[in-house]
Amino acid sequence: MSKDQELRKSAYEEIEKHQSLVESDPYRLHYHIMPPVGLLNDPNGFIQFQGTYHLFYQWMPYKTDHGAKLWGHYSSEDLVHWTHEEIALTPSEWFEKNGCYSGSAIEHDGKLYAFYTGNVKDEKGNRESYQCLAVSEDGIHFDKKGPVAHLPDGYTAHFRDPKVWKQNGRWFMVIGAQTEDEKGAVALFTSENLMDWTHAGILAGAGQEPLGEFGYMFECPDLFELDGRDVLVFSPQGLEAEGMNYQNVYQAGYVTGTFDPGQETYEHGAFTELDHGFDFYAPQTTLDEKGRRLLFGWMSVPDQNEQDHPTIAYKWLHNMTLPRELTWQDGQLYQQPVQELEALRQGEAVEHQVTLNQESRSLDGVDGKAVELMLSDIDVAEGCMSVAIGGNARILYSRGQQVLTLERQSYVDGTVEKRQVEVPQLDSLRIYVDTSSIEVFANDGACVMTARFYPSVQDTGIRFSSSAAVSFYLRKWNLAKVF
Ligand code: FRU
């Protein structure tokens, strides 16, 4: 049996061996992408290819920890219902033996081209990094072409996560990098034929303007146009917490500016975090056939208490965010759950016109483990209002401080921890609860907060509170279980 066949066989055996345990976990999610067993991290190769959406993912099927990753694969016709496909890539060759790391996919001449990083480590832990290509006719079976882009001078081997696109008839690739003086950077490559790649320099980096000191490594870059501006998304490592910003172990966010494909340069502004919650990293986007810029993120952060998640007892770990549509309106980036997710709604909405005055209460028909809540026309004249989920997570808005807070009980030690973001005025809140995950889209997605949380299994309660007079219109739907 070849190495590839062996790795596939043992991954499928892991799924089978642990399926009933995995599925018995009360914290298993109902409508978020998860691994069938083991650990999932970054979204990879996100593409709509021949009409079908494909989402590949970093997968370690043999344990709930990081290691020599495979590319797992889900496909979907509607971004709601997903089929777990055959394993796309296993780390079977010398140039990827310690992991088929993150990468992207494009369509070319009717084929799907996947670019990914071959991670290699020797016995002493020295790292090598190869940017590899694998081509697929059907989006399922891949033919590995091996390394196509090599590590240029000036960088360490922390060089990974190629994202490829076409512009002005040429191919471009951004790569997450670390320079020799240990500063995070986004490297640019160009190609005429997808096989031969030339290093064109650093597109954005720590230690250069306008970012300045900005950490020691950038992961998972993604450069794309959004309503006339060029957005560069990346995940920097090594930032210090600063007020409400950069509270997680590592960050994920974006800068905007102008990419000049002829000069191969990028002028850009300051960095903004994409998500202000606890668990969001390594997002990746694609442009779909409807012309929408869609994003998936990994709902976790590397090295952030990963081994303390209770799901580990059930042999699985981590999940994706919901698919989000990105738009740019009035000088601001918006992220909204894709419209297709309305198909998850079961039956009619429960609706209430709610007024609260220094009280805390539940509302008829408003509870559940897998629900969507839409609070609109929010009026907090003074004081605070809050929504508490399962006695564990709480979304709190303070009119006086103009701050939106997401609190949860830590799954490590039970203490209450929080993430915060400035919101001058709160008009709407759309909240997706899925047994052990919460995604909050404030003001039509101008501000997003994402987290895992672990409420007690019997607690389906949702409570609304205020410290002064508050009113809003509430709609609530139960959401379907599609996983
Ligand atoms: C980001 C990351 C990538 C790497 C992958 C390995 O979470 O560290 O830089 O390619 O995960 O699984």
Image (tube, helix red, strand yellow):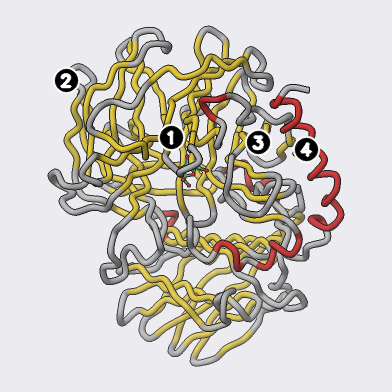
* Residue under the image location 57 percent in, 9 percent down: 110
Three-letter code for the amino acid on which mark 1 is drawn = Asp
**Residue 172 image point, x, y percent:** 34, 21
- The relative height of residue 59 versus residue 244 in the rendered view (above or below) is above
**Nearest to N terminus: mark 1 or mark 4:** 4
- The answer to whether 84 appears left or right of 197 in the picture is right
Residue at coordinates 61% horizontally, 47% vertically from top-left?
40
Q: Which residue is mark 1?
A: 161
Q: Nearest to the eye among marks 1 and 4: give it.
A: 4
Q: Amino acid at mark 2?
A: Gln
Q: CA distance from mark 4 to mark 3?
A: 14 Å
**Going from the N terminus, do you reach mark 2 or mark 1 first?**
1
Q: Earlier in the sequence, mark 4 or mark 3?
A: 4
Asked if residue 290 can be seen in this view, the reply is no
As drawn, 413 above or below 117: below
- State the image coordinates of residue 126 (x, y, percent, origin top left): 42, 40
Q: Residues within 10 Å of mark 1 (few under 14, many from 20)?
A: many
- Asked whether residue 30 appears in the rendered view, the answer is yes
Disc nearer the start of the sequence (4/2): 4
Badge 2 is on which residue? 263
Instruction: Single out the residue that lies furthest toward the left.
Output: 209
Residue that label 3 marks: 72
- Give the number of callouts: 4
Disc 2 versus disc 1: nearer the observer: 1
Name the residue beneath numbered marker 4: 10
Q: Label 3 vs label 1: CA separation?
A: 16 Å
